[in-house]
Image (cartoon, rainbow, N blue to C red):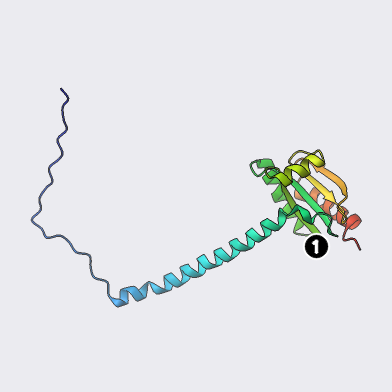
Amino acid sequence: MKKQRKSPKKKQSNQAPVEAPKKTRRDVLRLVPAGVLGAAVLGGAGYLGVGAVRVGAAEYDLSRIGTGKATIVQIHDPQCPVCTALQKEVRKALKDIDQEDLVYLVANIRTAAGQQLAQKHRVPHVTLLLFDGEGNLQEVLRGMQNKDALFQQFQAHFEAHGASA
């Protein structure tokens, strides 16, 4: 036969239950500055987040290849740490280049369009494809590279294949 556990007996107290102190109008007004600051911070973060989504969506639009501007396309797997590291180096290198005349795109190989582009050019992820303004492939950069090497290659590509007339 199993022994049953006895539940502990509740201690009875002769004291009256403690009531929460009542909030006065002054107590509530003291919280207003913190609430305003919090709303401003959250609103700003939301605005910045929306901008990041817009930039991200534009970067994945592969139909922008061949629209008159030299284009760099990263063949990218978002689950690959080397791809993510390369993307960071590319972004650092592009900071010093006039991006109005140069387009940076990301071909996510986990999407149909990204996979199709990679297969068309027979390249794996961790690869950069450099196109001229008309959409002709000019150069393929394979593997991880640092921002300084990328900057030099991007600058040379832009000077040779910048915006087309």
Q: Residue at x 88, y 59 (%)?
A: 162
Q: Nearer the viewer, residue 116 or 139?
A: 116
- Quadrant of the snapshot with the C terminus: bottom right
Kindly give the residue lying farthest to the front in the view shown.
112
Q: Quadrant of residue 76?
A: top right
Q: Which residue is mark 1?
A: 98
Q: Residue at x 30, y 77 (%)?
A: 25
Residue type marked 1 = Asp
Residue 95, image x, y percentages: 75, 59
Residue 150, image x, y percentages: 79, 49
Check the image and report above or below for 131 versus 26. Answer: above
Q: Residue at x 88, y 48 (%)?
A: 138
- Quadrant of the snapshot with the N terminus: top left
Secondary structure type for disc 1: loop
Q: Dot 1, crowdedness within 10 Å: few (<14), some or many (≥20)? A: few
Give the left or right position of residue 19, taking residue 109 as reference. Answer: left
